[in-house]
Image: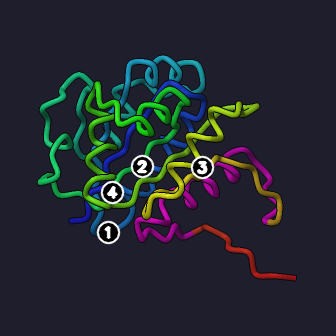
Amino acid sequence: MKRIIVGATGASGSPLLIQCLKLIREEEGYSSTLILSDSAALTLSCETEYSRAEVEALADEVYAPDRIGAGPASGTYPAEGMLVVPCSMKTLAGIHAGYAENLLLRAADVTLKEQRPLVLAVRESPLSPIHLRNMQELSMIPGVHIIPPMMEFYTRPQTIEEMTYHIAARLVTPFGIQAPAFHRWAGV
C-alpha cells in the first residue's frame, strides 16, 4: 500500500484538501495519513459544509499535530511522500527553516531528509518577497513540488467543483495518481 501523508493548514483551500483525500481513497493501492491543524479545522468550517470528523473519515489514518512522536515523525514510517494542502505561508516558512515544532512540520522535515516527494499547495495573494524566497529555495530541493492552486480555463470548466477537481488532480499527480477525469493539455 502506497501511503501519502496529507497535511492541512489554516490557509484557504479546504475544498482542495477534501478532493485530494477523495482522489487518494479512490486510487487502488493508495492510502492517506492526515495531519489536520486546528487552524485547518477552523477554515474548513468557513469554507465547506464538512465537519472535521467528516474530513478525517476520508483519511485512512489521522494524527493531531501535537502528536510529535507519532509514526510520520520518523523516517522509518513507510510513506511515498507528503502533500500539504492547503499550505499556509507560516507552514512554508517552517518547512524552509527546518522548524519542526509539530507533527505536520516534522513530517515535512522527514520527507525532505528521506528525499521523498513533498508537494506544497501554497496559498496566499499577493506574494511577498519573503514568500517567494521561501518557495524558490525549497523548489531547488529535488522532489519538492511547489504547486499553487491556480485556476485553469483550457478545459472550459463549468463549475467550481470542476476547477477544484482539476487542481486536486495536479496535486496528487507527483505521487503517481492519475485522476480519471483529469484533462491534460492536448495542444491546439
Q: Which amino acid does label 1 sit on?
A: Glu
Q: Where is residue 179 in the image (x, y as percent from the top left)?
A: 52, 67
Q: Where is residue 84 in the image (x, y as percent from the top left)?
A: 44, 43
Tell me the residue that label 4 is attached to. Answer: 81
How far apart are labels 2 and 1 at the CA level?
A: 18 Å
Nearer to me, 117 or 169: 117
How far apart are labels 2 and 3 at the CA level?
A: 18 Å
Q: Which amino acid does label 2 sit on?
A: Leu
Query: Does the residue at mark 4 contact the one at mark 2 (Cβ under 8 Å)?
Result: yes
- Circle 3 packing at 10 Å, graded few (<14), some (14-19), many (20+), is few
Query: Does the residue at mark 3 contact the one at mark 4 (Cβ under 8 Å)?
Result: no
Mark 3 falls on what kind of element? Answer: helix
Image quadrant in which you'd find residue 135? top right
How far apart are labels 1 and 4 at the CA level?
A: 17 Å
Tell me the residue that label 1 is attached to. Answer: 28
Q: Which colour scheme is used?
A: rainbow
Image quadrant in which you'd find residue 4? bottom left
Query: Does the residue at mark 2 contact the one at mark 3 (Cβ under 8 Å)?
Result: no
Q: Residue 136 carries which label?
A: 3
- Find the magenta span and give its range: 155-180
Residue drawn where x is 41% and y is 54% of the image: 118
- In the rendered structure, the answer to whether residue 73 lies left or right of residue 19 reads left
Tell me the residue that label 2 is attached to. Answer: 83
Q: Position of residue 5 (x, y in %)?
A: 31, 48
How many marks the image carries: the answer is 4
Query: Does the residue at mark 1 contact the one at mark 4 (Cβ under 8 Å)?
Result: no
Q: Where is residue 65 in the image (x, y as percent from the top left)?
A: 28, 26
Q: Which amino acid does label 4 sit on?
A: Gly
How far apart are labels 3 and 4 at the CA level?
A: 20 Å
Query: Does the residue at mark 3 contact the one at mark 1 (Cβ under 8 Å)?
Result: no
